[in-house]
Amino acid sequence: MSPIRSLVCAALLATATLLSACATHGAATSPATTSVEAKASPALVPFASDEGLARLGRSGAKIDFAALANQFEAQYNGTFCGPTSAAIVLNAVHSSSADLPRDHTRLRKDDVQFMRAGADPIVPRFTQDSVIDRGPKTRAQVLGEPITIGGKQVKDFGYQLRQFDAMLRANALVTRVVVVDDALSEQAIRADLANNLARGGDYVIVNYRREAVGQKGGGHISPLGAYDAASDSFLVLDVNPAVAGWVWMPTATLVKGMRTFDTVENRGYVLVHAP
Protein backbone atom coordinates (compact mmCIF):
# COMPACT_ATOMS: atom_id res chain seq x y z
CA MET A 1 0.00 0.00 0.00
CA SER A 2 1.36 3.44 -0.96
CA PRO A 3 2.15 6.02 1.74
CA ILE A 4 -0.69 8.26 0.49
CA ARG A 5 -3.25 5.43 0.54
CA SER A 6 -2.09 4.48 4.03
CA LEU A 7 -2.66 8.04 5.24
CA VAL A 8 -6.14 8.14 3.63
CA CYS A 9 -7.13 4.80 5.17
CA ALA A 10 -5.89 5.91 8.57
CA ALA A 11 -7.87 9.15 8.30
CA LEU A 12 -11.04 7.30 7.26
CA LEU A 13 -10.64 4.85 10.14
CA ALA A 14 -10.18 7.68 12.63
CA THR A 15 -13.24 9.48 11.25
CA ALA A 16 -15.35 6.30 11.47
CA THR A 17 -14.20 5.73 15.04
CA LEU A 18 -15.12 9.31 15.98
CA LEU A 19 -18.54 9.06 14.35
CA SER A 20 -19.18 5.77 16.09
CA ALA A 21 -18.27 7.29 19.45
CA CYS A 22 -20.57 10.29 18.84
CA ALA A 23 -23.42 7.99 17.82
CA THR A 24 -23.00 5.94 20.98
CA HIS A 25 -22.92 9.08 23.13
CA GLY A 26 -26.10 10.42 21.55
CA ALA A 27 -28.02 7.13 21.53
CA ALA A 28 -29.70 7.68 24.89
CA THR A 29 -33.04 6.57 23.49
CA SER A 30 -31.76 3.67 21.35
CA PRO A 31 -33.44 0.34 22.21
CA ALA A 32 -30.06 -1.36 21.76
CA THR A 33 -28.66 0.42 24.82
CA THR A 34 -29.61 -1.37 28.03
CA SER A 35 -28.11 0.97 30.61
CA VAL A 36 -30.84 2.67 32.64
CA GLU A 37 -28.54 5.60 33.36
CA ALA A 38 -27.91 6.16 29.62
CA LYS A 39 -31.62 6.04 28.87
CA ALA A 40 -33.01 8.35 31.54
CA SER A 41 -34.38 11.69 30.38
CA PRO A 42 -35.72 14.50 32.59
CA ALA A 43 -38.48 15.36 30.08
CA LEU A 44 -42.09 14.19 30.22
CA VAL A 45 -42.92 12.64 26.87
CA PRO A 46 -46.55 12.89 25.69
CA PHE A 47 -48.08 9.51 24.96
CA ALA A 48 -49.69 10.84 21.78
CA SER A 49 -46.30 11.59 20.20
CA ASP A 50 -44.21 9.43 17.88
CA GLU A 51 -41.76 8.76 20.71
CA GLY A 52 -44.59 8.08 23.15
CA LEU A 53 -46.18 5.49 20.88
CA ALA A 54 -42.79 3.96 20.14
CA ARG A 55 -42.17 3.46 23.86
CA LEU A 56 -45.44 1.59 24.26
CA GLY A 57 -44.64 -0.54 21.22
CA ARG A 58 -41.29 -1.71 22.58
CA SER A 59 -42.35 -1.92 26.24
CA GLY A 60 -42.06 -5.33 27.82
CA ALA A 61 -44.22 -4.41 30.82
CA LYS A 62 -47.57 -3.27 29.47
CA ILE A 63 -50.03 -6.05 30.29
CA ASP A 64 -52.25 -3.61 32.22
CA PHE A 65 -52.46 -1.04 29.44
CA ALA A 66 -55.26 -2.52 27.31
CA ALA A 67 -57.55 -3.25 30.25
CA LEU A 68 -57.08 0.21 31.76
CA ALA A 69 -57.38 2.03 28.43
CA ASN A 70 -60.61 0.16 27.71
CA GLN A 71 -62.10 1.30 31.04
CA PHE A 72 -60.51 4.77 31.11
CA GLU A 73 -62.55 7.86 31.95
CA ALA A 74 -61.61 11.41 32.90
CA GLN A 75 -62.42 12.84 36.31
CA TYR A 76 -65.39 15.21 36.13
CA ASN A 77 -64.68 16.88 39.49
CA GLY A 78 -61.39 18.56 40.39
CA THR A 79 -61.03 16.56 43.64
CA PHE A 80 -62.00 13.19 42.17
CA CYS A 81 -58.66 11.91 40.84
CA GLY A 82 -58.75 9.21 43.52
CA PRO A 83 -62.31 7.99 42.91
CA THR A 84 -61.74 8.11 39.15
CA SER A 85 -58.57 6.00 39.38
CA ALA A 86 -60.41 3.58 41.68
CA ALA A 87 -63.37 3.28 39.28
CA ILE A 88 -61.09 2.60 36.30
CA VAL A 89 -59.20 -0.15 38.13
CA LEU A 90 -62.35 -1.67 39.63
CA ASN A 91 -63.97 -1.87 36.20
CA ALA A 92 -60.81 -3.43 34.78
CA VAL A 93 -60.69 -5.99 37.58
CA HIS A 94 -64.38 -6.88 37.20
CA SER A 95 -64.66 -6.50 33.42
CA SER A 96 -65.82 -10.09 32.99
CA SER A 97 -68.26 -10.02 35.91
CA ALA A 98 -72.00 -10.10 35.22
CA ASP A 99 -72.81 -8.55 38.60
CA LEU A 100 -71.51 -5.01 38.45
CA PRO A 101 -73.23 -2.24 40.43
CA ARG A 102 -75.61 0.22 38.79
CA ASP A 103 -75.15 3.84 39.86
CA HIS A 104 -78.51 5.59 39.55
CA THR A 105 -77.36 8.91 41.00
CA ARG A 106 -77.02 10.46 37.53
CA LEU A 107 -80.33 9.09 36.24
CA ARG A 108 -82.77 11.87 35.35
CA LYS A 109 -86.54 11.54 35.25
CA ASP A 110 -86.70 12.21 31.52
CA ASP A 111 -84.09 9.50 30.85
CA VAL A 112 -86.81 6.87 31.26
CA GLN A 113 -89.77 8.94 30.07
CA PHE A 114 -90.18 7.01 26.82
CA MET A 115 -88.88 3.62 27.93
CA ARG A 116 -90.99 0.64 28.84
CA ALA A 117 -91.96 0.28 32.50
CA GLY A 118 -89.21 -1.19 34.65
CA ALA A 119 -86.47 -0.65 32.07
CA ASP A 120 -83.07 0.35 33.47
CA PRO A 121 -80.81 2.29 31.04
CA ILE A 122 -77.90 2.53 33.48
CA VAL A 123 -74.82 0.61 32.34
CA PRO A 124 -73.52 -1.67 35.14
CA ARG A 125 -70.12 -0.39 36.28
CA PHE A 126 -68.30 1.34 39.10
CA THR A 127 -68.41 5.14 38.91
CA GLN A 128 -66.54 8.03 40.44
CA ASP A 129 -69.55 8.69 42.67
CA SER A 130 -70.32 5.13 43.75
CA VAL A 131 -66.82 4.20 44.94
CA ILE A 132 -66.81 7.10 47.43
CA ASP A 133 -69.81 5.75 49.32
CA ARG A 134 -67.84 2.81 50.69
CA GLY A 135 -64.70 4.77 51.54
CA PRO A 136 -63.49 6.33 54.79
CA LYS A 137 -64.44 9.86 53.73
CA THR A 138 -67.85 11.17 52.82
CA ARG A 139 -68.41 12.99 49.57
CA ALA A 140 -68.67 16.25 51.54
CA GLN A 141 -65.31 15.59 53.21
CA VAL A 142 -63.68 14.83 49.86
CA LEU A 143 -65.01 18.20 48.69
CA GLY A 144 -63.73 20.13 51.71
CA GLU A 145 -65.94 19.55 54.74
CA PRO A 146 -63.51 19.83 57.70
CA ILE A 147 -62.31 16.62 59.36
CA THR A 148 -60.15 16.07 62.43
CA ILE A 149 -56.45 15.46 61.76
CA GLY A 150 -53.94 15.65 64.61
CA GLY A 151 -56.57 17.06 66.93
CA LYS A 152 -57.38 19.93 64.56
CA GLN A 153 -60.31 20.55 62.21
CA VAL A 154 -58.93 20.98 58.70
CA LYS A 155 -60.19 20.93 55.14
CA ASP A 156 -58.70 17.81 53.59
CA PHE A 157 -59.69 17.86 49.93
CA GLY A 158 -59.40 14.64 47.96
CA TYR A 159 -57.48 11.69 49.39
CA GLN A 160 -54.23 11.14 51.20
CA LEU A 161 -52.45 7.89 50.29
CA ARG A 162 -53.80 5.77 53.17
CA GLN A 163 -57.28 7.25 52.81
CA PHE A 164 -57.21 6.25 49.16
CA ASP A 165 -55.98 2.77 50.04
CA ALA A 166 -58.80 2.40 52.58
CA MET A 167 -61.32 3.38 49.90
CA LEU A 168 -59.94 0.71 47.54
CA ARG A 169 -60.16 -1.94 50.26
CA ALA A 170 -63.69 -0.83 51.15
CA ASN A 171 -64.58 -1.61 47.54
CA ALA A 172 -63.36 -5.20 48.03
CA LEU A 173 -59.92 -4.90 46.43
CA VAL A 174 -56.77 -6.44 47.92
CA THR A 175 -54.04 -3.83 48.22
CA ARG A 176 -50.48 -3.18 49.32
CA VAL A 177 -49.79 0.46 50.11
CA VAL A 178 -46.22 1.75 49.82
CA VAL A 179 -45.15 5.06 51.31
CA VAL A 180 -42.17 6.46 49.40
CA ASP A 181 -39.98 7.69 52.24
CA ASP A 182 -36.24 8.32 52.23
CA ALA A 183 -35.51 4.71 53.23
CA LEU A 184 -37.02 3.31 50.00
CA SER A 185 -34.58 3.28 47.09
CA GLU A 186 -35.36 4.26 43.52
CA GLN A 187 -34.15 0.84 42.39
CA ALA A 188 -36.60 -0.97 44.68
CA ILE A 189 -39.49 1.23 43.54
CA ARG A 190 -38.67 0.69 39.85
CA ALA A 191 -38.58 -3.08 40.31
CA ASP A 192 -41.83 -3.13 42.32
CA LEU A 193 -43.77 -1.09 39.76
CA ALA A 194 -42.28 -2.70 36.64
CA ASN A 195 -42.86 -6.23 37.93
CA ASN A 196 -46.51 -5.41 38.58
CA LEU A 197 -46.96 -3.97 35.10
CA ALA A 198 -45.45 -7.11 33.58
CA ARG A 199 -48.03 -9.35 35.32
CA GLY A 200 -51.69 -9.71 34.50
CA GLY A 201 -54.47 -9.34 37.05
CA ASP A 202 -52.96 -6.59 39.21
CA TYR A 203 -52.54 -2.85 38.84
CA VAL A 204 -50.56 0.16 40.08
CA ILE A 205 -51.97 3.52 41.16
CA VAL A 206 -49.53 6.31 42.04
CA ASN A 207 -49.94 9.33 44.31
CA TYR A 208 -47.53 12.18 43.54
CA ARG A 209 -47.23 15.96 43.63
CA ARG A 210 -47.55 17.60 40.22
CA GLU A 211 -45.22 20.50 40.96
CA ALA A 212 -42.42 18.06 41.80
CA VAL A 213 -42.63 16.42 38.36
CA GLY A 214 -42.80 19.64 36.34
CA GLN A 215 -46.57 20.00 36.03
CA LYS A 216 -48.96 22.60 37.40
CA GLY A 217 -51.04 21.67 40.42
CA GLY A 218 -50.80 19.91 43.77
CA GLY A 219 -51.29 16.30 44.84
CA HIS A 220 -52.61 13.90 42.22
CA ILE A 221 -53.57 10.23 41.79
CA SER A 222 -53.57 8.19 38.56
CA PRO A 223 -52.94 4.61 37.40
CA LEU A 224 -49.82 3.45 35.55
CA GLY A 225 -50.19 1.75 32.18
CA ALA A 226 -46.70 0.53 31.22
CA TYR A 227 -42.95 0.66 31.82
CA ASP A 228 -40.36 1.18 29.08
CA ALA A 229 -36.94 -0.07 30.16
CA ALA A 230 -35.19 1.56 27.21
CA SER A 231 -36.07 5.06 28.42
CA ASP A 232 -36.54 4.06 32.07
CA SER A 233 -39.96 5.69 32.13
CA PHE A 234 -43.48 4.86 33.27
CA LEU A 235 -46.68 5.68 31.39
CA VAL A 236 -48.94 7.73 33.67
CA LEU A 237 -52.57 7.48 32.55
CA ASP A 238 -53.48 10.91 33.90
CA VAL A 239 -57.17 11.04 34.81
CA ASN A 240 -57.30 14.83 34.46
CA PRO A 241 -56.66 15.60 30.77
CA ALA A 242 -57.68 19.22 31.38
CA VAL A 243 -54.40 19.62 33.28
CA ALA A 244 -52.10 17.04 31.67
CA GLY A 245 -52.50 14.23 29.17
CA TRP A 246 -51.02 10.76 29.38
CA VAL A 247 -47.24 11.06 29.68
CA TRP A 248 -44.15 8.91 29.93
CA MET A 249 -42.48 9.98 33.18
CA PRO A 250 -38.86 9.05 33.97
CA THR A 251 -38.54 6.83 37.03
CA ALA A 252 -36.44 9.41 38.86
CA THR A 253 -39.08 12.09 38.22
CA LEU A 254 -41.96 9.88 39.34
CA VAL A 255 -40.09 8.89 42.50
CA LYS A 256 -39.37 12.54 43.19
CA GLY A 257 -43.08 13.32 42.88
CA MET A 258 -44.05 10.50 45.23
CA ARG A 259 -41.32 11.33 47.74
CA THR A 260 -43.21 14.46 48.82
CA PHE A 261 -44.96 15.16 52.12
CA ASP A 262 -48.75 15.21 52.34
CA THR A 263 -50.37 16.27 55.64
CA VAL A 264 -49.16 13.36 57.80
CA GLU A 265 -46.60 11.41 55.72
CA ASN A 266 -45.14 11.06 52.23
CA ARG A 267 -47.07 10.10 49.16
CA GLY A 268 -46.46 6.80 47.38
CA TYR A 269 -48.32 4.09 45.47
CA VAL A 270 -50.82 1.27 45.88
CA LEU A 271 -50.57 -2.17 44.27
CA VAL A 272 -54.03 -3.59 43.62
CA HIS A 273 -55.57 -6.92 42.67
CA ALA A 274 -58.90 -8.70 42.93
CA PRO A 275 -59.74 -10.72 46.05
Image: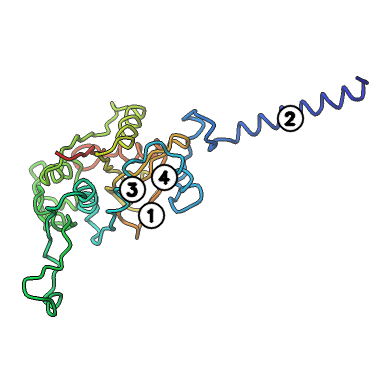
Q: Which residue is mark 3?
A: 66
Q: Residue 105 in the image: x percent, y percent?
A: 11, 65
Q: Any mark on residue 248, and which?
A: 4
- Residue bearing mark 2: 16
Q: Nearer the viewer, mark 1 or mark 3?
A: 3
- Residue at x 12%, y 56% (from the top left corner): 101
Q: Which amino acid, mark 2?
A: Ala
Residue 185 left/right relative to 45: left
Residue 232 lies left or right of residue 120; in this view the side is: right
Whichever of callouts 1 and 3 sits on the residue coming sooner in the sequence is 3
Q: Which is more N-terminal, label 4 or label 2?
A: 2
CA neighbours of label 1 inside 10 A, class few (<14), some (14 to 19), many (20+):
some
57 left or right, relative to 72 = right
Mark with earlier residue (2, 1) = 2
Task: Point out the image quarter for the C terminus.
Answer: top left
Type of amino acid at the residue the image marks with label 4? Trp
The span from disc 1 to disc 4 (Cα, nearest Å) is 10 Å
At label 1, which amino acid type do we have? Gly
- Under circle 1, the secondary element is loop
As helix, strand or loop, the secondary structure at mark 3 comes to helix
Q: Which residue is mark 1?
A: 245
Task: Judge whether 59 appears above or below 37 on screen.
Answer: below
Q: Residue at x 89, y 25 (%)?
A: 5
Q: Nearer the viewer, mark 4 or mark 3?
A: 3
| Cα distance between the residues tagged 4 and 3 | 16 Å
Indicate the quadrant where residue 10 lies. top right
Label 2 and label 1: CA atoms lie apart by 42 Å
